[in-house]
Amino acid sequence: MFSLRQVQDVAVINLLGEIDDLSLTIVGNMIHDLLEVSMNKVVLNFEQVEHINYKSLAGLLDQTLKIRKLSGDIKCAHMSTYTWEIFKFVGADQVLKIYDSVDDAVMSFDYKNDDNQTWH
């Protein structure tokens, strides 16, 4: 369903298709497993996402706040305009940092400030 790869010390989760409550529960479990092995830098790749249920985003926002308490972060990449509009509609764009590419999101972890982020 989803694939996971590591780029440097960042976990990249490639999302696919329709994202709903079950999908985000699976992603949440993946993030929990990553935290168990001290990986607290996560990029969610939305390149192949067709739709995301806006009601499901609350759990993702909760995960983001939890991982930030552990000095990590969740960042989003490769979002279509449609998906970004859903994030914006629920205010998720105010919590999650969104980048044009996975590479930009991964590289952003190396900077103390996020002035290099690319907003839609």
Image (tube, helix red, strand yellow):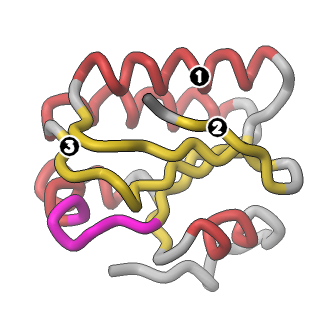
Q: Amino acid at mark 3?
A: Ile
Q: Is residue 26 left or right of residue 29?
A: left
Residue tagged 3 = 52
Along the line of sight, the residue nearer the viewer: 56 or 78? 78
Neighbor class of circle 3 (other Cα within 10 Å; few <14, some 14-19, many 20+) is many
Percent position (x, y) of residue 30? 59, 22
Image marks 2 and 1: residues in contact by CB distance under 8 Å: yes
Name the amino acid type tagged 2. Leu
Q: Earlier in the sequence, mark 2 or mark 1?
A: 2
In the image shown, does 56 or 50 lie closer to the viewer?
A: 50
Q: Which residues are magenta?
A: 78-84
Figure check: 4 above or below 14: above
Tell me where residue 14 appears, x and y as whole percent. 51, 46
- Contact? badges 3 and 1 (CB < 8 Å): no
- Quadrant for residue 39, please give it: top right
Placement of 47 over or under 4, stated as above or below: below
Name the element at disc 3. strand
Q: Mark 2 or mark 3, which has the lower sequence index? A: 2
Residue at the spot of label 1: 30
Identify whether 79 is placed above or below 20: below
**Which quadrant of the rendered structure holds the C terminus?**
bottom left
Q: Is residue 75 magenta?
A: no
Q: Dot 2: what SS?
A: strand
The mark lying in front, picked from 2 and 3, is 2
Three-letter code, disc 1: Met
Image coordinates for residue 22, horizontal then vertical, percent: 29, 17
Query: Any mark on residue 4, and which?
Result: 2
x, y percent for residue 114: 64, 74
Q: Secondary structure at mark 1?
A: helix
Q: Is residue 79 left or right of residue 78?
A: left
Quarter-of-image position of residue 53:
top left
